[in-house]
Image (tube, grey):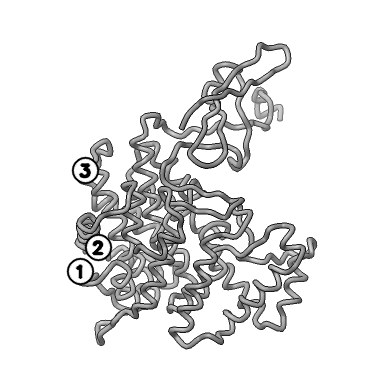
Amino acid sequence: MTAETKATLHLEGQTPVDFPVLKPTHGNDCIDIRTLGGKTGLFTYDSGFLSTASCKSHITFIDGDKGELLYRGYPIEQLAEQCNFLEVAYLLRNGDLPNTAQKLEFEGTIRRHTLVHDQLTRFYNGFRRDAHPMAVIIGVVGALSAFYYQAMDYTNPRHRDVSFTNVVAKLPTIVAMAYKYNTGLPFMYPRNDLGYVENFMYMMFGVPCEEYKPNPVLARALDIIFTLHADHEQNASTSTVRLAGSSGANPFACVAAGIACLWGPAHGGANEACLNMLEEIGDVSRVGEYIKRAKDKNDSFKLMGFGHRVYKNFDPRAKLMGKVCADVLAELGLENDRLFKLAKELEKIALEDDYFIEKKLYPNVDFYSGIVQKALGIPTSMFTCIFALARSVGWMSQWEEMLTDPEYKIGRPRQLYVGAARRDVVPLVNR
């Protein structure tokens, strides 16, 4: 990053003020306005932070116009095809892909920390059986701070390492237990002889009365889903984790805050909403009707799974997810699955329709991920939990990057106050 040029702000009646322009590795140049308040007495207003860089980061880069997603410089397509999820986790946290020795050590460390404190399992009994699994994991992940509090000095690299390991290793166990509790089935404890994804599938779908062997095709599909959701720049939940972490808060509490943010239907809940939309449409014969409704500005219906706030071209994750979807359905003999055929027809019509082309409403990753997860046997209510499990790697990497940034400060956004002007309290008898 360099600051080779400057931007000059001209205010009426005041001397022009210069600000350095920072040049990134990729992406838009950024005007460094950290001294704006001191120099001019003014702040900027940017609702939703659409034009504001809140931090410097080495981790993830998105080019929405090109439809490009890079983890530490590597295209997501290459990582999904050539690496497993824990290799990607190592990359996001450490900056480079592991060699063979580093891979084995990292995977072994994660494998040996998948168990949770036995008393933590009793927390589940405090929830209703029909509680949404996201509500459950928010509470349980937050409770980790009461059990694993020994490594609390976050200036110590070893303590940060322990925190990262605990979050990434224990999230699959916590998520699987939320599913088991919701369905009334007994918890399945992790097995150290299984890989990360296979172990999660075992804890989700295994039962004590019979042997469970994860299907390698389905395990690979879920591994790719994890990779595609591992990080996504400064999105709402990642920004939440960073903001919470900027106060020095416990990382488990920060991750719980990220999970709460992710739960929103405009964020992690989008794949659940997409699948619900496909169920509402019901049949290929009704696609035209719903396409027409989606174009009607007076109709409240929205075509879920199309368009993205960042990507103004194809979401690169959607292309990969479409292939994964086809592979999974073929493995399970569901090539003629009603929802898959419906999704393909909906995609075809939308991509040929001038309305969607002009508005650049291309399929996003949520369009197919719900179908894949349903085919894997994951219920709709668990979709966002799967998202949170995968994104925990990105959250913890972003959390650590923030804490080790020499320019790190507690987050404190400004506001444009538009409330009542200063006024005095009138005595009660005169009101």
Work out how far the residue at label 2 is from the one at label 3, CA to CA, in angstroms.
19 Å
Q: Which residue corresponds to mark 1?
A: 192
Of marks 3 and 1, which one's residue comes earlier in the chain? 3
Q: Which residue corresponds to mark 2?
A: 114
How many numbered badges does the structure rendering display?
Answer: 3
Which of discs 2 and 1 lies nearer the camera? The answer is: 1
Of marks 2 and 1, which one's residue comes earlier in the chain? 2
Image quadrant holding the C terminus, namely top right
Of marks 2 and 3, which one's residue comes earlier in the chain? 2
Residue 294 in the image, given as x and y percentages of width and height = 73, 66
Q: Which mark is residue 305?
A: none
In-front residue for pair 275/3: 3
Helix, strand or loop at mark 1? loop
Q: Is residue 122 left or right of residue 284?
A: left
Q: Is residue 283 left or right of residue 184?
A: right
Residue 141 in the image, given as x and y percentages of width and height = 34, 56
Q: What amino acid is labelled 2 in the image?
A: Thr
The residue carrying pointer 1 sits among few (fewer than 14), some (14 to 19) or many (20 or more) residues within 10 Å by Cα, namely some
Disc 2, disc 1: CB below 8 Å?
A: yes
Q: What amino acid is labelled 1 in the image?
A: Asn
Q: What amino acid is labelled 3 in the image?
A: Arg
Work out how far the residue at label 3 is from the one at label 1, CA to CA, in angstroms.
23 Å
